[in-house]
């Protein structure tokens, strides 16, 4: 075990200044100050310096030593094609999720669409019906930004179960990702077709065998909605809607229709199967909330988190992700005593509209049992609720739009688990 | 050919307002207004809706229909291991380069490094010599941002050749990429070791068989330099320095030492082979510039660009990338008459420090020969030079730090080529 020069009675968060001024004390204990190589001769050349390396590839791949960093694909059986691919967010740093690790919730598998044959139709209450090929869309102005996407059912276990599930951070929060999405503003395509002024909704349909379809208010389509063609600098991947998907910043994942083939302009919602039974929430008073649209302000500590173990006492950086469908994150507070005391975390640049925001705070663990929490506030003043407050709004067993404060319990052995 | 309702005598840039007000005229001509499907019945279900799709994968991959979007790997022969992997920047949208398409300049191939055995040594003019494992570094505070990386020799043909090379945009500008890089501040590691106040340089060495090493001023190490462990949300890939690399925002790519194994604190530069012969520039007066450090302000139009062909007249979005080693991009101007007249382009959010910045401007091509150019200015007021001005500073044949204005010639057939 490490030497503990000063042994405070309990764990504590450190300000940046505190950390830097006292840092050496903690960090030296962590870094391997061996017998210490004083001369260059002691710094042995590794084998990698003795032989030329291998040639570069046309398309690069992750290290073979990182093979375990993959999505957890759940739900696939011979009889059903609904799967959930959980992103390993406890392995992610920064605010970009690699496209290969982006979460996916699929109800009918991933269709193979030939891009040259694919068309997007804009029709319904319009002056003209239009069809757009990929090549057509690529002539339009392209716009977009870095955005989060979250499955409406992310963290569903926390709402559905009376007792906390023995799950990891990725299993509880991994239906969440951040990417740069670039495409054509929907409003331009609607404007091209000429919208009937009485129209107020647009029904978007995918080309999957489940024909996933959702009704989207016109106001959202005329705001920052895009028909996305690019994710993180390259064309969409099949699991993300190749060759095109709807991208509605801040809106529940399910409405961001993948393999988009149709935008039908109407004056009423369609009440598709995907928005009548599924993707609604039962509220505490028994009523049903549909078209819930924006994902609420939310945060989670990813480092450390359930599934990890603190190897010893001493310095750690508490780090996590915060996001809100309503705009930018204004602040994140963290607590290591279950919410009795809160400290303001550092927000890392860039802090973007409807994007994942990374927060962190230096922290010293003295080996006691602690309850780590984070609480986000967005630029509109929305504050992430406690679980009890969330359950005052949503009926017991509700599985969608869970955004309450997460508590990670760290026991004296350093084992971390999910608790309410 | 498309109908041309109003036929101006020459091509022109359009303001956002102009574009939106007259947009329908241009865009309808581009979109496929077929016989037009008026009823849903006419919008045929594609095959993809008839059968369930395939299951999701643990690690996602690009579409098989995008197999041609890869890096161009040049230079590999049986006798040498120096390669250049050019990123297909004419295929990229936004400011993030997918890690699999990130450029690479390799002098000794890509070493295979076992992460558990790898150590980073900090030694030299320090109070202590330290060694850090990957696990040690992951205990430290992690920071970083989205940054550009550019090979010092990017666009070398433009400086080296008296006549313009018949090359594509990617071949001329593809040693350039943008990524989110996250790691440990170098200043923290130096502080841990305790720097001798007389020290002013740090020599960084990689674990490749060429032992690529560069001398870096202490002021840069104490600013925003990091030992990067993550790129775009996942651990570094082998071609990018797995398990760790130096990341010096704004500084020429070669100094961002990959497979980093050693930081030696000194009071003078080492004049390694990588900074005595290579990676210096011959100036117009015959003197040699070494330690040129920051990449100058630069921009290039990627859409349209050499290697592409405009299929017909009408509306296009002129779009490109701008960047500066000295900070944020302040503005980008574009010209379609070889620099006689300039229009201010739109800068896309986010505009970040030492990162790629996307610019665009709507444009109408009437079929005449035009010369497209872009000219970037950074927040310090540095303005991208013309080629003649660049050559007043650098000797004919210089291959590094070329940042002059690029001219794409579009002939009457829509063919695009590189001209001076």
Image (cartoon, coloured by chain):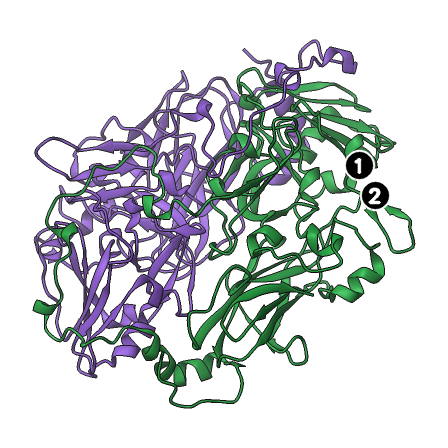
Chain colours: A purple, B green
Q: Mark 2: which secondary structure?
A: loop
Location of the N terminus of chain B by quadrant is: bottom left
Q: Quadrant of residue A19?
A: top right
Q: Mark 1: which secondary structure?
A: helix
Image point 71% across, 43% down: which residue? B223
Residue B139 image offset from top left, x and y in percent: 54, 27
Q: How many marks?
A: 2
Residue B60 image offset from top left, x and y in percent: 34, 38
Q: Nearer the viewer, residue B218 or A41?
A: A41
Distance from Cα at disc 1 to Cα at disc 2: 7 Å
Label 2 resides on the chain identified as B
Placement of B329 over or under B27, stated as above or below:
above
Looking at the image, tell me whether mark 1 or mark 2 is earlier in sequence order: 1
Mark 1 and mark 2 residues within 8 Å of each other at the beta carbon: yes
Is residue A420 in sight in this rendering? yes
For residue B193, the mark is none
Crowding near pointer 2: few (<14 within 10 Å), some, many (20+)?
A: some
Is residue A344 in sight in this rendering? no
Q: Are marks 1 and 2 on the same chain?
A: yes
**Relative to residue A259, is residue B395 drawn left or right?**
right
Location of the C terminus of chain B by quadrant is: bottom right
Crowding near pointer 1: few (<14 within 10 Å), some, many (20+)?
A: many
**Relative to residue A261, is residue B300 drawn left or right?**
right
Label 1 resides on the chain identified as B
Q: Nearer the viewer, residue A109 or A349?
A: A109
For residue B290, the mark is 2
Placement of B21 over or under B260, stated as above or below:
below
Q: Which residue is mark 1?
A: B275
Q: Quadrant of residue B290?
A: top right
Placement of B393 over or under B361, stated as above or below:
above
Residue A23 image offset from top left, x and y in percent: 64, 29
**Relative to residue B236, is residue A353 drawn left or right?**
left
């Amino acid at each position: 075990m490490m030497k503990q020069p000063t042994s405070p009675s309990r764990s504590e968060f450190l300000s940046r200044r505190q950390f830097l001024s006292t840092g050496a004390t903690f960090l030296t204990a962590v870094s391997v100050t061996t017998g210490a190589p004083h001369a260059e001769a002691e710094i042995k050349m590794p084998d990698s310096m003795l032989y030329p390396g291998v040639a570069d590839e046309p398309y690069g791949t992750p290290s073979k030593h990182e093979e375990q960093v993959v999505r957890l694909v759940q739900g696939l059986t011979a009889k059903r094609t609904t799967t959930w691919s959980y992103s390993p967010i406890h392995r992610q740093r920064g605010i970009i999720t690699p496209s290969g690790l982006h979460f996916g919730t699929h109800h009918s598998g991933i269709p193979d669409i030939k891009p040259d044959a694919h068309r997007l139709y804009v029709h319904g209450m319009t002056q003209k019906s239009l069809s757009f090929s990929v090549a057509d869309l690529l002539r339009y102005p392209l716009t977009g930004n870095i955005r989060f996407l979250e499955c409406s059912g992310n963290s569903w276990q926390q709402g559905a179960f009376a007792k906390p599930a023995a799950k990891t951070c990725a299993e509880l929060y991994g239906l969440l990702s951040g990417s740069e999405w670039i495409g054509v503003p929907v409003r331009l395509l609607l404007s091209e077709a000429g919208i009937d002024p009485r129209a107020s909704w647009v029904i978007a349909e995918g080309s999957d065998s489940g024909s996933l379809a959702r009704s989207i208010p016109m106001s959202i389509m005329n705001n920052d909605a895009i028909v996305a063609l690019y994710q993180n600098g390259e064309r969409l991947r099949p699991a993300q809607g190749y060759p095109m998907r709807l991208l509605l910043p801040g809106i529940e994942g399910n409405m961001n229709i993948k393999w988009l083939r149709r935008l039908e302009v109407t004056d009423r919602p369609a009440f598709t199967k995907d928005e009548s039974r599924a993707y609604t929430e039962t509220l505490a008073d028994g009523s049903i909330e549909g078209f819930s649209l924006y994902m609420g302000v939310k945060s989670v500590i990813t480092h450390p988190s359930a599934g990890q173990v603190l190897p010893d006492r001493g310095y750690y950086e508490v780090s996590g992700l915060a996001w809100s469908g309503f705009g930018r994150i204004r602040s994140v507070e963290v607590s290591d005593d279950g919410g009795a005391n809160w400290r303001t975390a550092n927000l890392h640049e860039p802090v973007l509209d409807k994007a994942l925001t990374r927060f962190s705070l230096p922290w010293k663990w003295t080996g006691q049992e602690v309850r780590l929490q984070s609480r986000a506030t967005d630029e509109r003043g929305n504050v992430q609720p406690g679980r009890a407050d969330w359950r005052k709004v949503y009926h017991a067993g509700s599985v969608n739009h869970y955004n309450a404060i997460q508590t990670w319990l760290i026991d004296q052995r350093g084992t971390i688990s999910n608790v309410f």
